[in-house]
Structure formats: C-alpha cells, structure tokens
Amino acid sequence: MDLKQILAIIITNPVRKIFAIVFAFGLWFFVSIGNDYQYTRDIRIVYSDLPDTLTIVDSVSSVSVTFTGRGGSLLSTWAAPPKARCAVRNVSLGQNEISVKRLFIPMGFADLTTTYNTSSISITVDTKVSKRIQVTVPVKGTPNQDFSIDHVVVLDTVFISGPRGVLQDLSEITTETLSVRNRSKTFAKKLRLAQISPLLEVSRNDVSVQVVVDSSVEKVFTDIPLRLVFTPDQRVSSDKAVLDTLIVRGAHGRIGELRQQDITVQIRLTKLSPGEYDLPATILLPDYVTPVYSHPQRFNIVIY
C-alpha cells in the first residue's frame, strides 16, 4: 500500500481525520520544542526587603519582558508566568529609579534569556507612620416625631498607618450610613468602616457605636447676625443685618446647651456678578439640631 492509498483512507474516514490532526500537531510540537523562539509578555513585579519604617506610595506593577530560548522552555513560562523580584532595601525617600538589571526572574531553564523594554523602573517611597483617627458616623432618617438624637458615641478605637504625606491630610474616616428612622430609645449597632486609599491600613474593619436618643424640644433665637462672604474686590450691601427669628429642634440636653454663638447664618457671594439679588441664607447648626422655622426667608443683596 503506497502513501496515496494511506492518505485516501485517512481522509475518507472521520475518525482517522481526527487522528491525523492530532498526529500532525504532536509531530509539529515535538519538532518545535527543540528550536529557539522568542515571545514578549508583561510580568508582575514583586517588591521585597523594604525596611519597616518605609512604605511604597507608587510603583511600577509590571514590566514587559522578551523571553528567548527553546520552545519547550518557553512553553513553561507561558503556562506559568514567573514574577520579577525586586529588592528595595536601599531606597531613599521620594522617587527612586531602579535599573532592570537588579530584577531577578526565577526560571528553571538555563537556556532561557531575557531582555526588557525599558532600562529602569521607578518607585516612590515615604516614611510609614501610624496615628489614631477620628471616626464619623453619617446618619439618615429621623427618629419618632417626639424624639431626636442627642449624640453618637464610637465605642472602638481605630488606628491607621501609611505614608506620612497621605496621613497628614487625613483627619477622619467615616462608617457606612446609619439609619435612625422611627427610633425612640438609645440603641447600639456595629458599622463597617468606609473604604479608604489602598495605601493605608486600618487596625479594624468595623466599629461599635451607641446612639443616644432623647425627647425633642424646640428653642427660639432672635436677631442672629447675618454673615456675608465676599471677595476683597466686591462691595456689597444687604437690606437686613440679622435673621429676625429662628426656631430649632433637637434632643433635650443638646438644645439646652445651644447658644446663639453656636449658630451661623451666612450668604456666600464670591461667585456672583455685580447686581441685585434676593437670596436665601444658609443656616449652619451643630450636629443633630435642625431648623424648624426662620424669618425672613430671603435677603435683598446688592453687589456693586
């Protein structure tokens, strides 16, 4: 039986067609793994040996590498990509340029060589600090009609650590929003902390809080000074200098301690052009105190 007859049998039989394809691929694979090839891919960089007093602020997460070597060896790096290791024990504060010659890629084949598409990678380092952080609890909803929140106590202490440059601008973190709808007595609840920058680490993921609820009372204030906020280039005037009447509501203890100097009534004019305006005032009150009534509702303002 010659070669043409063998090929005819394989082609006319579907099972033999599959066998022929598998056989051809196996033959190609057997030949190809012995030849030299190259391919390029991005691999992850793992940074190690950073002193405990420092932390990474920004870094290159991957690098493009061209692998050259036997087909069989390359196949292993394709199936299980290695990671480039970078020791950063001797870095300085700020941005550092690190030569790719310092990268180490562990590979089990001596015949493989690597080249990089860049001569260096950058990493930014800052001093690692830790501090106690204030936790703020955002509230939604309102208690029962005759009740108000007196105060919210965070029962757990939270510490946060990370780069000095990031932490120095951070004064508080928040929790998930707490619903107080239809509450009429003091209660406790555990709340998750909101997500923060991945550069920072918190000592815990949630906190226990106690919400103190008390009976509501109202209080009347009169002749609260109006504060106009404007730029040095603006000249302004108002038809009234005070808010005549303000009625506020809150928990009995909180309202009892509330003084007029704790209240701000203001109108911001910095983004307005010259002209005449009828504008509402913004009333700034302490937490858990709400305005019930105010007069007048608007002020006549002239900007020259």
Image: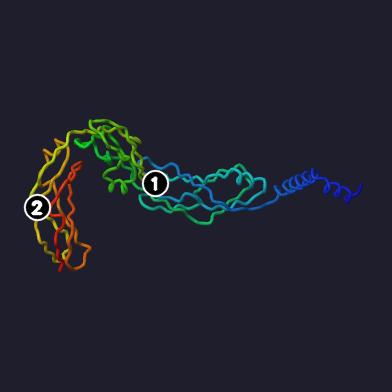
Q: Is residue 155 above or below residue 42?
A: above
Which residue is found at the position 25% from the left and 39% from the top?
142
Kindly check if marks 1 and 2 are in contact, taking CB atoms under 8 A apart as contact.
Answer: no
* Residue position for label 1: 56
Q: Which of 132 and 106 lies nearest the eye of the viewer?
A: 132
Query: Helix or strand or loop: what does disc 1 sit on?
Result: strand
Observer-nearest of 304 and 60: 304
Q: Would you name the residue on which mark 2 appears?
A: 244
Farthest residue to the front: give it. Answer: 145
Place of residue 235 in the rendered image (x, y in percent of width and height, measured from the top left)? 13, 66
What's the residue type where badge 1 is placed?
Ile
In the picture, measured across the screen, residue 240 lies left or right of residue 116, that is left
Separation of residues labelled 1 and 2 (CA atoms): 56 Å
Within 10 Å of disc 2 (Cα), the crowding (few <14, some 14-19, many 20+) is some
Q: Using the rendered image of the protein, determine whether residue 179 is visible from the camera's viewpoint.
A: yes
User: Crowding at label 1, few (<14), some or many (≥20) Cα neighbours within 10 Å?
Assistant: many
Asked if residue 262 is positioned above or below residue 298 in the image, the reply reads above
Q: Earlier in the sequence, mark 1 or mark 2?
A: 1
Residue 196 - label: none
Q: What type is the residue that disc 2 sits on? A: Asp
